[in-house]
Amino acid sequence: MRRLVAMTLSMLRDDPERWLGATSVPVTVVRGSLDALSTPAWARRLAVRPGGELVEVPDVPHAFPFDHPEALADAVRSTLTRTMP
């Protein structure tokens, strides 16, 4: 239980909108369409920046990279292809 509380407090302190605002590189936000933690609206808001992109992986939850790592790798590969000269 102690680990769960510590992890929850850590997540609440994290503010991706703040630290993403300080970056100038293209950002790809990847979420599962069944994600109960990250709403589509919030993910779109994170992706709205120069070169930003939102990738929604169909029919998977928040922790999809553990069961579907290829979907995350595809999103990263797509971003690299799109942004690298």
Image (cartoon, grey):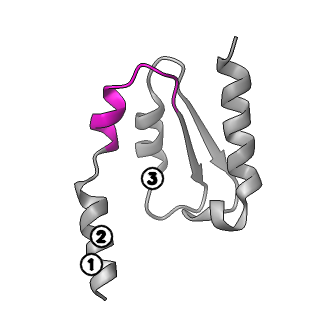
Per the image, the residue denoted by label 3 is 39
Tell me if residue 33 comes above or below residue 6 in the rendering: above
Q: Are marks 1 and 3 in contact (CB under 8 Å)?
A: no
- In percent of the image, x 42 and y 36: which residue is there? 46
- Tag 1's secondary structure? helix
Per the image, the residue denoted by label 2 is 8
Q: CA distance from mark 2 to mark 3?
A: 17 Å
In the rendered image, residue 24 lying in the magenta stretch gets the answer yes
Q: CA distance from mark 1 to mark 3?
A: 22 Å
- In percent of the image, x 36 and y 32: which residue is there? 20
Q: Are marks 1 and 2 in contact (CB under 8 Å)?
A: yes
**Image quadrant assignment for residue 1:** bottom left
Looking at the image, is mark 2 or mark 3 earlier in the sequence?
2
How crowded pointer 2 is (Cα within 10 Å; few <14, some 14-19, many 20+) is rated as: few
Q: Which amino acid lies under the numbered mark 3 shown in the image of this protein?
A: Thr
- In percent of the image, x 61 and y 56: which residue is there? 33
- Tag 2's secondary structure? helix
Q: CA distance from mark 1 to mark 2?
A: 5 Å
User: Dividing the image into 4 quarters, which one contains the C terminus?
Assistant: top right
Q: Which amino acid lies under the numbered mark 2 shown in the image of this protein?
A: Thr
How crowded pointer 1 is (Cα within 10 Å; few <14, some 14-19, many 20+) is rated as: few
The percent coordinates of residue 83 (x first, y second) are 65, 19
Q: Which amino acid lies under the numbered mark 1 shown in the image of this protein?
A: Val
- Tag 3's secondary structure? loop
Per the image, the residue denoted by label 1 is 5
How crowded pointer 3 is (Cα within 10 Å; few <14, some 14-19, many 20+) is rated as: some
The percent coordinates of residue 22 (x first, y second) are 31, 26
